[in-house]
Image: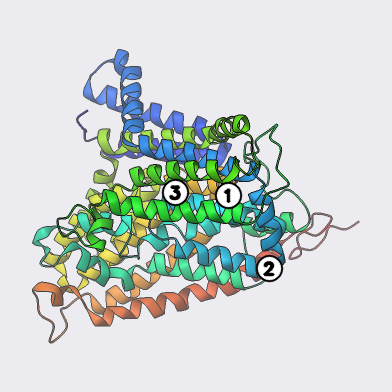
Amino acid sequence: MAPIDAGVLSVMPPLLAIGLALLTKKVLFSLILGIFSGVGVYVVKTGLGIHWFFPVIVETLVGSVEKNAAMVIFLCLLGALVALIARAGGARAYGTWAAAKLSTKRSVSLVTALLGMIIFIDDYFNCLTIGTVMRPVTDRRRISREKLAYFIDSTAAPVCVIAPISSWAAAAAGYFPAEAGISGMQAFILSIPFNLYALLTSFMVLWMGLRNNADFGPMRKAEERAARGGLLYGAGPGPRRKIRGMGVSDKGTVLDLIVPVVFLVGACVTAMLFYGGLWNGDGTTLAEAFVDTDANSALTLGGLASLVLVFFLYVPRGLISFKDFFVTITRGVKSMVSAILILTLAWTIAAVCKDMLNTGTYLASLVERSSLPVGLIPAIMFAAACAISFSTGTAWGTFGILIPITITVCYKAAPQLSIPTLGAVMGGAVFGDHCSPISDTTILSSTGAVCNHISHVATQIPYAVTVAVSCLISYSIVGLLTGNAVPDGVATTGAAALFNVSSLLCLPLAFGILLAPLLLLPKISRRRQPDAKGHSRTSPRPAA
């Protein structure tokens, strides 16, 4: 369907979906209403007639599933694999072993964060693998599912977007215009020090893992609830992925979890290289193979190979009978239905915004028409990327909209700010992908942690906003200091024109700005916490 210029109405579907999701805690209801509103605008604006309303919805829904069919299959395979590992006793044995080795919440949190940073090839794979491996351990140490989901989400897209060998690097580099004077991969690597959101988010994850009493806002309440012996996953419908009626073998060992997970990682990476053409005999390099791969198909192939492995690992040893193996697969797939439904609707509303209403293009046009100082270009583009990605739930779509605009605007106004602004755009795009309720990686992080989706969003947003505000302030200050003139000795063409050393002030400045709320907000949160009778510690108690 041909996209239209819907103007300000183009932002109605994502705002409606996000607002209702946060207000009602009903994700499916909110996404459906968002889709209905977007299709309604499209049908009215194009003059198709009301009788086209449901056919357009069906066509968009089917198209979204077709584009992401491999991911749906991978989720089914992963659900089956997780169920089989649990049924064989591998998860329980691993949880007991890891709990003995990792004796404190700090050590468990740190290992979870570091493991997430190590698996940087693909954000989808990261979200689901880390949850499978670490959830038994974090549960034993009374770490809330919201905190686990935060660790997973914050080491997925924010780490992938600064890793040169990842699906994200390929996406960002692919949107870089050829006429820019340097290759997309060169620009990507040069922009890493300026991707403040990704770098500061990674730092904040380690900070939260290493320090005691560092949490604030809703996350602090979730952690205190879990520490007191309350529910690990908090209130809200459908956070658990229990597989009812499934016994657990008492013969399982630690290796019954480690071997399938390690094999899954290896199989998926190998499949990525295969789909990237590493062994085609045409001289494709390792980096080129990662750039050209089909990540979703590779994950599906790795998941299928892992299921074959666990069949021969579990059934001959009597951990699972032949009949129970396939019954468990069915139950494991069923456990993923909720996540698949949410993802399908999120993909659909993203398609409505991108392919019908041009939401991202409309927001980008507002940036292009602004008349703010040239030095504020990085801050403006960062804010625009945050708004577009949060509204549409897609970082890659934001790359495609804003990266060409960024290069064009900077070349005309301030060439020395091109690379810093590119880093700002990629960081802002990750912000929305990191915390939007309709983002696929946010949904998959909730799925991997087996956490209520809206609980994950509500507890993570204050952390993400804290980092984003620190970045925005830093971009504004350094942009105003360095963005009004090309410095002496710097060429105006080629790679040299794109890189301004003085802009490296962004990173240390941003770290300094972030440390202030990280130190102050936990103290404020503790003071405001109500006592046993519900009275705030900062306010006088009412007279008896």
For label 2, count other residues whose C-alpha is less than 10 Å away and answer few (under 14), some (14-19) or many (20+). few
Residue at mark 1 to residue at mark 3: CA–CA distance:
12 Å
Q: Which of marks 3 and 2 is in front?
A: 2
Mark 3 secondary-structure assignment: helix
| Residue 73 picture quarter | top left
Q: How far apart are marks 1 and 2 (CA)?
A: 21 Å
Q: Mark 2 points at which residue?
A: 101
Looking at the rendered image, the disc whose residue lies closer to the viewer, 1 or 2, is 2
Q: What residue type is labelled 1?
A: Ala
Residue in front for this viewpoint, 161 or 300: 300
Of the residues under marks 1 and 2, which one precedes in the sequence?
Answer: 2
- Residue drawn at (24%, 56%), measured in percent from left and top? 278
In the rendered image, residue 239, in percent from the top left (x then y), is placed at 62, 41
96 w.r.t. 43: above or below? below
**Which residue carries the number 3 mark?**
441
Q: Considering only order in the chain, which callout, 2 or 3, is on the residue closer to the N terminus?
A: 2
**Rendered residue at 73%/54% (across/down):** 225
Residues packed near mark 1 inside 10 Å, few (<14), some (14 to 19) or many (20 plus)? many
* Number of numbered discs visible in the structure rendering: 3
Whether 289 is drawn above or below 455: the answer is below
Extreme residue in the bottom direction: 489
Q: Where is residue 301 in the image (x, y as percent from the top left)?
A: 38, 43
**The residue positioned farthest toward the front in the image shown:** 316
Residue type at the position of mark 3: Thr
Q: In which quarter of the image is residue 179?
A: bottom left
On-image quarter of the C terminus:
bottom right
For label 1, the residue is 449
